[in-house]
Image (cartoon, rainbow, N blue to C red):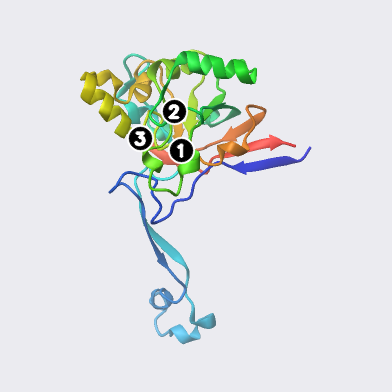
């Protein structure tokens, strides 16, 4: 049976809003012409004109943080501990079997920006799609943010997963979740308004902080989730192996049998 591969990752690119101001990537593109002198420096006496078409190699210099582009967050990102007191694992310690599992998509595109998804919302959506969660399934959340990518409001777009919604998944054995928004939690601009009114600090990063109780990972800044069915696919999201890091970039893909 033929297998279809759906790319659910966004680009790393300049000049597209995918992070708050000051947190975005910087990519310097060096063309073949730019680097001809660099090539000749390795070979004394060689002149650029002696190279085929006078060209060197195309390379890119990139300044990134581990949370640029589509990435997998490790439990260490959320807190120093997980599982109620254990040392939180870094990205190079995440079990690889967590990163290649059947996927489930929850569709919350109809929720307003800043909405905090509840456990009841998750249960209702699972009922709508007729799916019973199984341990280690990767649950991804399709929010309004997917349609905002490339637009100035991307970072503030989409709903977020609250503490109780996150624990609902984790208590059923889910260990990797994902969202097409900038953050698994509701965008900070909306949480800031709620904190200003209530003074309740527990609202801040509440979905992330659920990892203190049950260790888990999540994918952020996924893309093209609209192309996925509710279930019946497999997700591969192996992270780049960065020692001791809080996250690693991934080319996340969904695999569907035709």
Pair 1/3: label in front: 1
Circle 2 SS class: strand
| Residue 255 point in image, percent of width and height | 65, 37
Question: In which image quadrant can residue 94 be found?
Answer: top left
Q: Mark 3 points at which residue?
A: 246
- Is 140 rendered above or below residue 21? above
Residue at (50, 81) in percent of width and height: 51
The secondary element bearing badge 1 is classed as: helix
Side of 107 where 183 appears, left or right: left
In this rendered view, identify the residue nearer to me: 166 or 106.
106
For marks 1 and 2, give the CA distance.
20 Å
Q: In this view, does 15 lie to the left or right of 96?
A: left
Task: Please tell me how crowded label 2 is: few (under 14), some (14-19), or many (20+) other residues with Cα within 10 Å.
Answer: many
Q: How far apart are marks 1 and 3 (CA)?
A: 23 Å
Where does label 2 land, which residue?
Answer: 217
Question: Which of the two labelled residues, at mark 1 and mark 3, occupies the earlier sequence position?
Answer: 1
Q: In which quarter of the image is residue 204?
A: top left
Residue under numbered circle 1? 145
Tell which tag, 1 or 2, sits nearer the viewer. 1
Task: Give the camera-side residue of 131 and 127.
Answer: 127
Residue 133 visible in the shown view: no
Q: Can residue 179 be seen in this view?
A: yes
């Amino acid at each position: 049976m033929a297998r279809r591969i759906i790319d659910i990752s966004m680009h790393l690119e300049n000049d597209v809003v995918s992070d708050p101001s000051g947190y975005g990537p910087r990519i310097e593109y060096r063309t073949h012409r730019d680097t001809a002198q660099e090539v000749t420096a390795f070979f004394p006496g060689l002149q650029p004109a002696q190279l085929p078409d006078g060209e060197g190699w195309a390379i890119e210099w990139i300044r990134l943080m581990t949370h640029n582009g589509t990435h997998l967050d490790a439990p260490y990102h959320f807190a120093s501990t997980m599982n109620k007191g254990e040392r939180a694992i870094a990205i190079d310690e995440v079990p690889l079997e967590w990163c290649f599992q059947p996927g489930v998509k929850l569709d919350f595109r109809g929720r307003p920006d800043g909405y905090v998804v509840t456990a009841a919302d998750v249960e209702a959506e699972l009922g709508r799609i007729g799916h019973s969660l199984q341990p280690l399934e990767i649950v991804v959340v399709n929010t309004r943010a997917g349609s905002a990518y490339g637009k100035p409001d991307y970072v503030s777009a989409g709903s977020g997963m609250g503490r109780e919604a996150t624990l609902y998944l984790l208590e059923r054995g889910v260990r990797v979740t994902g969202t097409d928004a900038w953050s698994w939690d509701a965008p900070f601009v909306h949480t800031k308004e709620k904190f200003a009114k209530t003074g309740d600090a527990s609202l801040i990063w509440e979905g992330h902080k659920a990892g203190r109780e049950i260790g888990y990972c999540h994918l952020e800044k996924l893309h093209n989730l609209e192309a996925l069915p509710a279930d019946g696919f497999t997700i591969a999201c192996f992270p780049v192996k960065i020692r001791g890091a809080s996250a690693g970039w991934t080319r996340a893909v969904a695999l569907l049998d035709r």
